[in-house]
Image (cartoon, rainbow, N blue to C red):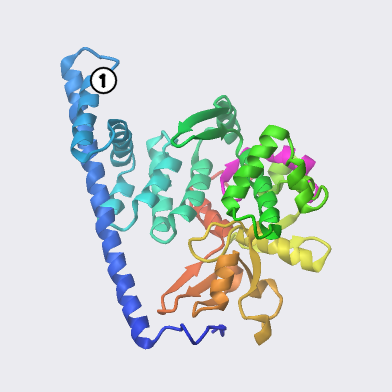
Amino acid sequence: MTTQATSTRWAPTPAERARTSELVDDYLEQQVIIAQAHARQARILAEGRAIAEAQTRRGGTGSEFEHPLRSMAAEFAVAGRMSDRTIRARMEWAVDLVDGFPATFALFEEGRISEGHVRAIVDAGSRLDDEDARAEFERIILPRAVKLTAGQLGSVARKLADDIEPLPLEERHEEAMADRSVRVAPLPDGMGELTYIGPAVMVYAMHDRATQMARTIHRTKDGTDDRTLDQIRADVFAEIALAGLPTADLIDQQGGDALTKIKATVQVTVPWQSLTGVGDESAFLAGYGPIPAEAARRLAGEAATWIRLFQDPDTGCLRTVDTYTPTKAQRRFLIARDEHCRFPGCRQPAIRCEDDHTIPYSHGGPTDVRNLANLCRAHHVLKHNSNWDFRHGPGGVMEVISPTGRAVKHKPTPVVRFEASAEIARPDFGSDPPPF
């Protein structure tokens, strides 16, 4: 077991550890009750909408204003002190869930998954119109829903739905591109909201560049600057949008043109078949999900650095990275293997995390990928200043043990996606290759 540098001043006593365990058990019981209540509300709203639809059919007018539905939504909204628009949206979602995802709803009613998990499943699977395809999607994703966080599940569900979807991502992306836009909306107290809808790679790249600049400023700011990282990022984004680059004053404060040289970084995994044009399997943007192969090929053509990854074809585990410099190779391997901070539930991208020795270097832990993992700054500090224990297993699997003794197996995100996609029923063409 890993030895931690825990401060004895706050280390939990046996009584505190036992009471904490009881509190966690109580919390989990309430979590089940809350999920069951949310499921019951969904069934109620779905039935209310069904009554409104029956009233519409009985009226025979086909009013474009859907008076029965509006009236039904208003009935719930007034009673619940909510907006009827909110109720209508919840009714639509409830019908999609109850009628379109019966197996998911069954788990929801049992309290085994939360509303966050349900939304991740419905959001990813709603585009699967074929009943058999959706049933296969539920068959594969639900066993993982009871083990993963909602954030982890969303990543796996999007990739799984993309693999099952008969319409190629390239075509869907081309249609979705027609909806790209920039919108503004007023907010109270002299504020406003700007929303950009566009290709995921561009969105994540813009956020990354603004974040890198903001972190640079945040690290070097003087005592008179009390802005948070989010506030600095917003200021940087506004300056780039309005002036093209950070203002002269901001550049001077950071020393020369260092800020202007910062470039966006995104992590995209591309199968070699798609990279060379032999195939069109979607690539994967870390922190988002599948992106079209053509978009990935364009990115690869402009990329300053290529890293070849070798996966085990049976397990999805990353084996090695083809690079020259050993220390950089280890870092690139860990970023590709982990994708995110390895603390359960954390979605901080690995490119913004720190390398942690599972067994501390000071206690003889080797600087080896079998003893290294990505942890964000907050969880890195927590690990080395608390009784949280980490054990490194084969294929990058981590066993994370809480101070109360609860153990959680945490697999790297690429492995979880691989295992889900491997369960899709594929046509059996025999051993002979296709005739082309």
158 sits left or right of 37 in the view? right
111 sits left or right of 382 in the view? left
Q: Which is more toward the observer, 15 or 149? A: 15
Q: Is residue 44 above or below residue 180?
A: below
Q: Is residue 426 above or below residue 70?
A: below
Q: Quadrant of the N terminus?
A: bottom right
Q: Is residue 78 above or below residue 225?
A: above
Residue 300 at x, y percent in the picture: 75, 43
Q: Is residue 169 above or below residue 142?
A: above
For the residue carrying disc 1, how many other residues have a C-alpha within 10 Å: few (<14), some (14-19), or many (20+)? some
Tell me the quarter of the picture where residue 89 sits: top left
Residue 41 at x, y percent in the picture: 23, 45
Residue 117 at x, y percent in the picture: 39, 51
Amino acid type of the residue that numbered disc 1 sits on in the rendered structure:
Glu
Q: Verify whether residue 231 appears in magenta.
A: no
Residue under label 1: 66
334 sits left or right of 418 in the view? right
User: Could you tell me if residue 168 is visible in this image?
Assistant: no
What's the residue at 17%, 16% (across, down)? Answer: 59
Q: Quadrant of the C terminus?
A: top right
Q: Verify whether residue 286 appears in magenta.
A: yes
What's the residue at 33%, 71% (across, down)? Answer: 24
Magenta highlight range: 283-306
The kind of secondary structure element at disc 1 is loop
Residue 228 at x, y percent in the picture: 58, 54
What's the residue at 23%, 31% (across, down)? Answer: 73
Residue furthest out toward the top: 61
